[in-house]
Amino acid sequence: MKGLFKSKPRTPVEVVRQTRDLLIYANRSPDTREAKREEKMSELGKLIRELKQILYGNSEAEPQAEACSQLTQEFFKENTLRLLITSLPKLNLETRKDATQVVANLQRQQVHSRLIASDYLEANIDLMDILISGYENQEMALHYGAMLRECIRHQTVARYVLESQHMKKFFDYIQLPNFDIAADAAATFKAQIEAEFWSRWELLTRHKSTVAEFLSKNYDWFFAEYNTKLLESTNYITRRQAVKLLGDMLLDRSNSIVMTRYVSSRDNLRILMNLLRESSKSIQIEAFHVFKLFAANQNKPPDIVSILVANKSKLLRLFADFKTEKEDEQFEADKAQVVKEIAAL
């Protein structure tokens, strides 16, 4: 008999609408009847968990395309995303985790071959201000950071963040004393600059051109901050991540103009030569991949040539014993070319 009275499962649209209603409630001033509020917040947690299960499936069933489509359309009809983001601090830890996964998944959901999350975020771009500022809240930083990285899959969002004043904040966020938050900020910064956050080649190319344009327009302040706050940081992890990302940036063909400008600076060369002297083999190897661009430049400015000539014997001695932990033919070939270029000066 018990099965006869089993409640009818909620449709995806109903789950979204009920979630939205409770998010509106959560954003209001606390109810004087605390027990009632706890009950509603508990129900909200269950609904957000149900949203996640529809989008990701569970141990018993894979996600259904039609259910995901219905959920996505209803979610972006009104301001459910805004409500979820602004309500996040009021949710408990497990519900925050579920909400973060829901937001992440929705960035990839296509409805009639369109990423409607992109259209919504373009019209509500100020939500990125909230997500970025989340790095300043220790409890919220990792959740907002994960959401932000998923949102910058969309070119309009990536361009907004790159061109906003927020970009400068990442140089400070990466140096926060909390390692987890600093590492998360570094991951977001990396996603922005490398633009390696989309699998389809044509969108990847568009993002890379966006980044190349940003670096060209903002070269002076960006690399001044990058050098002093990251490459010359007192924090080992920051230096290691920064020099690796620098190599990735400069070796990307879409950044060739920026690379040529970077390797024409004596100040940049000085920083890279100091990194080559680091006790950390990891930093040395990553620094070498940038240094080789200075050596390979066939149009070296006179002051670059002067520095290389003045340090010629030291550099040749350094590279004589310079090896990777594992045998690497490409590295050895690059090193031999660098040695040849320096020896010929």
Image: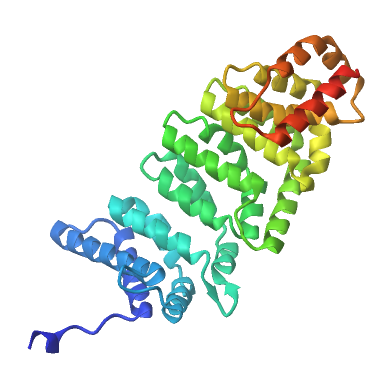
Q: Pick the residue in front: 22 or 212.
A: 212
Residue 207 at x, y = what percent? 69, 55
Residue at 83% across, 26% down: 295
Decide if residue 136 is on the left or right side of residue 12: right
Residue at 61% across, 26% down: 283
Residue at 62% across, 47% down: 192
Residue at 78% across, 15% down: 316
Up the image or down, 298 lies above or below 106; here it is above
Up the image or down, 178 lies above or below 217; here it is above
Residue 183 at x, y = what percent? 48, 37
Q: Is residue 303 visible?
A: no
Residue occupying the far left of the picture? 1
Decide if residue 196 is on the left or right side of residue 312: left
Up the image or down, 151 lies above or below 300; here it is below
Up the image or down, 88 lies above or below 279; here it is below
Residue 132 at x, y = what percent? 51, 46
Q: Pick the residue in front: 129 or 297.
A: 297
Residue 119 at x, y = what percent? 59, 68
Q: Can residue 262 be seen in this view?
A: yes
Name the quadrant of the N terminus.
bottom left
